[in-house]
Amino acid sequence: MILSFSEFMKPPYQITTRIIELIASISEKIGEVNSAYLYKPPTELRKKNRIKTIQSSLEIEGNSLSLEQVTAILDNKRIIAPQKDILEVKNAIRVYQDLVSYKPTSLTSFCKAHSTLMEGLVDNPGKIRTKPVGIIMGATVTNVAPPGNIVKSLVKELFDYLKRDKDLPLIKSCVFHYEIEFIHPFMDGNGRMGRLWQTIILLQYSPVFEFLPIESLIKARQLEYYRILGESDNQGNSTGFIEFMLQIINESLEDLLTNQNVNLAANDRIEIAKEKISKTAFNRQDYMRLFKDISSATASRDLKLAVEKGILEKAGDKRTTLYKFKK
């Protein structure tokens, strides 16, 4: 039976004790990430995590390219591989490089992302389907998605839920991911769109999710991922899937804090400072308050480098020196 969201005001799910525990754990880890300035990791780590995200999400859908091959494509190097697989990677790179430009509550933005992601791979990319389609979990057709004549209204109601519901973005991102898999709004590419859009929704919660490779943990637990999607279908709600995805997010943050806590380079510190104090003049002491683990000599080198690169304007001399980021 197909349920309309309008009858229930929102998609069916319950907030369990486990969900509350996971949200508390995730919130605590987000605080640690912010304190360590890991919400925007160093440049090389951003690239590494972006590659893991793209490769994992596409491998779930049957793409054969390795991390090394995806890296080569990102670096504009030629590789020998099926053209379809190469195009899938190139399309995904375009989407993920433009991640922050997509609007999480916009159906138009959602369709635009699908158009880019599936360009050259399907007919009419970015168009909501009007034909029937079976839902495939792995290599098995598990059930038939809602009929094409009601898909557009279901998707519109799902985006209305994103706009109007007061639940945390953490929960709404999981619900949206599940519902996209259930509704199957496109003829193909729904799995990668569900995972992509969950990340875009999570960016409302914290910028750390722009470069957090959640998809790599989903890939490692792919059979469980499909099993829980199927169980949620049978139960008629996404509660179990919310718990599963929150656990994945929690583990991803734990991995970031445990294994990726690398030292920031000068360019990374300057970039963070620009976000924090971009509109006001500041001195070296203000800069050091942002980065408590650096010496005064390191702070001076950072600021000197930014002035030489034309990022900062400098006024005054010695103790009276002030800096300001150029517009």
Image (spheres, rainbow, N blue to C red):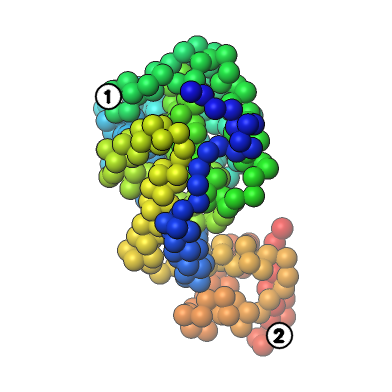
Rendering coords of residue 227 (x, y %): 31, 36
Rendering coords of residue 272 (x, y %): 56, 64
Name which residue lies at 27% across and 24% down.
139
Cβ–Cβ below 8 Å for labels 1 and 2? no
Residue 126 higher or lower than 71, as above or below: above
Instruction: Please tell me which residue lies in front, 1 or 10.
Output: 1
Q: Residues within 10 Å of mark 2 (few under 14, many from 20)?
A: few
Name which residue lies at 41% across and 35% down.
235
Q: Is residue 99 visible?
A: yes
Per the rendering, the mark at residue 147 is: none
Q: Amino acid at mark 1?
A: Ala
Helix, strand, or loop for circle 1? loop
Q: Earlier in the sequence, mark 1 or mark 2?
A: 1
Q: Which residue is mark 2?
A: 320
Name which residue lies at 49% across and 31% down.
180
Rendering coords of residue 176 (x, y %): 52, 38
Residue 70 higher or lower than 210, as above or below: above
Instruction: Please tell me which residue lies in front, 33 or 121.
Output: 33
Name which residue lies at 35% across and 60% down.
255
Q: Residues within 10 Å of mark 1 (few under 14, many from 20)?
A: few
Per the rendering, the mark at residue 139 is: 1
Quadrant containing the C terminus in the rendered view: bottom right
Direction top: furthest residue: 131
